Image (cartoon, rainbow, N blue to C red):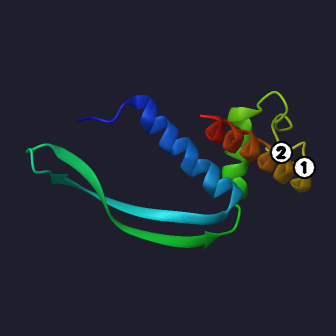
Amino acid sequence: MKMSEKKQNDMVEEALLQIATGGELRDRTFELREDEEGGKNMVLVKEVIKQKEPDLAAVKMWLKARAGDRWQEEAGTGEAIIDIGELLREAKKLFEEVEGTKNDK
């Protein structure tokens, strides 16, 4: 069974957010296995937990996608108009909003 495009996008978005904010990341390995009825299911076969520092490139990508009106670069220079502290505060705020949305479901 093919995974829906929305599900794929959600997975990529979640991975990007984890990279942007750092912390605990789970590296999961799945295998497609056949069950008793002959159906096929993805089964988790390995999980490794890693500690990662926040990645500023991922923060920048996340903010441009989620808060493009507030995040921009100075024309032609590639220089950010926002300081790093503000950048990390904004990423944390967006992370908390997304986590709150997930917990509401």
33 to 66, vertically: above or below? below
In percent of width and height, residue 68 lies at 76, 30
Is 50 positioned to the left or the right of 91 in the image?
left
Residue located at (86% from left, 37% from top)? 74
Query: Amino acid type of disc 1?
Result: Glu
In percent of width and height, residue 64 lies at 72, 36
Q: Nearer the viewer, residue 45 or 8?
A: 45
Neighbour tally class for label 2: few under 14, some 14-19, many 20 plus, Cα within 10 Å? some
Residue receiving disc 2: 90
Residue located at (46% from left, 64% from top)? 27
- What is the number of the mark on residue 13? none
Is 49 positioned to the left or the right of 57 in the image?
left
In percent of width and height, residue 48 lies at 46, 72
- Secondary element under disc 2, as helix, strand or loop, is helix
Q: Nearer the viewer, residue 63 or 24?
A: 24
Query: Amino acid type of disc 2?
Result: Glu
Is 44 positioned to the left or the right of 88 in the image?
left
Residue located at (27% from left, 50% from top)? 42
| Residue at the outermost top position | 69
Neighbour tally class for label 1: few under 14, some 14-19, many 20 plus, Cα within 10 Å? few
Q: Nearer the viewer, residue 45 or 92?
A: 45
- What is the number of the mark on residue 86? 1
Quadrant in which the N terminus appears = top left
Say which quarter of the image contains residue 75: top right
Q: Are marks 1 and 2 in contact (CB under 8 Å)?
A: yes
In percent of width and height, residue 58 lies at 66, 51
- Secondary element under disc 1, as helix, strand or loop, is helix
Q: CA distance from mark 1 to mark 2?
A: 6 Å
Quadrant in which the C terminus appears = top right
